[in-house]
């Protein structure tokens, strides 16, 4: 297996990478992560992902072991060694491996830094035809703005969708939309794009930010506010966004058709803007090389 991983200063085949069972990521889910899409061996919006990593690390009081330049260098090396041109790059920082199991922060223990990449999943069918989702009560903690590796609640919520033959679980806290178990959710009603505003109840996705920026740039009316469960049921369109899935139409919610039950005109418009933006960024970074 030629796939290269980076672990604590060394590059190695992924199947040779080893961490201690006392690593706090393993014991407590004590760490931060990012998932970055890579197109034609160029990381997309790397700076934004590294800025969010910094926000998560600040939020969990873990010092960032690397500068942006150091991260970029390591990320590029893993991408170059990867088997595929389009990749999903994963990076994780944990509070390291202490010599004992104790919840309080260890002193003088270096963080564990891990990077690896796999093929970017092809989403052609989902992008074209749309996906089915179900809803569930959001029972996660109240710091969902942080991208931490403590993901058990997300794991269980997402599995509910998979068990029901759906692509994602949409989460509702106190009757209000927060996000998907692994994604952000947008609502379109009467030509207006709506999404929950950035706060502790959801992760501000890099794709969420880009979709809002593209909407503003192209004059699509937009509203950030609390969205009631009932509004999801009468939406013209629902969208799912994430870095690796980009913008997917949701055509069914809890077994009921969303809008016409087919991807609507607004999602097609956003997919086109997204694609054009991605190509533009790729051309610009090609000129940098
Ligand atoms: N919310 C959650 C809970 C997620 O796991 C993800 C995927 N990282 C997102 C939102 C979307 O974030 P992004 O657009 O940065 O991939």
Image: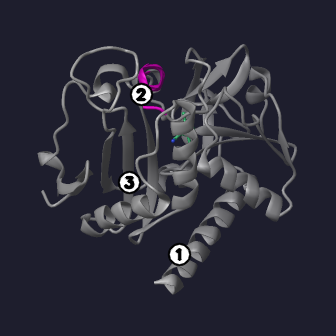
Which of the two discs, 2 and 1, sits closer to the camera? 1
* Upstream in sequence: badge 3 or badge 2: 3
Q: Which residue corresponds to mark 2? A: 162
* Upstream in sequence: badge 2 or badge 1: 2
Q: Which residue corresponds to mark 1? A: 282
Up the image or down, 286 lies above or below 279; here it is: below
Q: Secondary structure at mark 2?
A: helix
What segment is highlighted magenta in the picture? 148-159
Graded by Cα atoms within 10 Å as few (under 14), some (14 to 19) or many (20 or more), the crowding at tag 2 reads some
Q: Is mark 1 within 8 Å of ligand 1?
A: no
Q: Secondary structure at mark 1?
A: helix
Who's the residue at 54% across and 45% down the image?
A: 54
Quadrant (top left, top right, bottom left, bottom right) of the N terminus: bottom left
Residue 150, magenta (yes or no): yes
Predominant secondary structure, magenta span: helix
- The furthest residue to the front: 108
Q: Is residue 170 left or right of residue 151?
A: right
Res 89 label = 3
Residue 73, magenta (yes or no): no
Which of the two discs, 3 and 2, sits closer to the camera? 3
Q: Quadrant of residue 84?
A: bottom left
Whether residue 25 appears in this view of the structure is yes
Q: Give how far across and how far down residue 3 sits, in percent.
A: 20, 58
Q: Give how far across and how far down residue 2 sits, in percent.
A: 15, 61
């Amino acid at each position: 297996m030629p796939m290269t991983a980076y672990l604590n200063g060394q590059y190695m085949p992924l199947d040779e990478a080893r961490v201690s069972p006392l690593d706090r990521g393993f014991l407590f889910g004590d760490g931060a992560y990012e998932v970055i899409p890579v197109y034609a061996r160029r990381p997309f919006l790397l700076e934004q992902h590294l800025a969010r990593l910094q926000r998560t690390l600040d939020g969990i009081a873990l010092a960032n072991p690397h500068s942006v330049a150091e991260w970029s260098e390591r990320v590029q090396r893993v991408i170059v060694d990867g088997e595929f041109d389009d990749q999903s790059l994963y990076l994780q920082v944990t509070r390291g491996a202490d010599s004992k199991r104790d919840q309080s922060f260890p002193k003088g223990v270096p963080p564990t830094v891990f990077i690896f990449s796999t093929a970017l999943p092809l989403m052609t069918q989902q992008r074209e035809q749309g996906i089915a989702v179900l809803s569930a009560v959001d029972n996660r903690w109240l710091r969902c703005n942080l991208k931490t590796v403590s993901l058990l609640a997300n794991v269980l919520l997402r599995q509910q969708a998979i068990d029901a033959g759906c692509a994602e679980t949409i989460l509702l806290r106190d009757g209000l939309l927060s996000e998907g178990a692994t994604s952000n959710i947008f609502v379109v009603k009467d030509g207006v794009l709506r999404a929950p505003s950035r706060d502790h109840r959801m992760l501000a996705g890099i794709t969420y930010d880009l979709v809002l920026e593209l909407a503003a740039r192209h004059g699509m009316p937009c509203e950030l506010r609390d969205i009631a469960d009932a509004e999801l049921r009468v939406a013209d369109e629902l969208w799912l966004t994430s870095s690796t899935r980009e913008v997917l139409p949701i055509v069914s919610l809890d077994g009921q058709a969303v809008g016409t039950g087919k991807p609507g005109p607004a999602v097609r418009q956003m997919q086109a803007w997204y694609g054009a933006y991605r190509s533009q960024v790729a051309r610009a970074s090609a000129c940098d090389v």
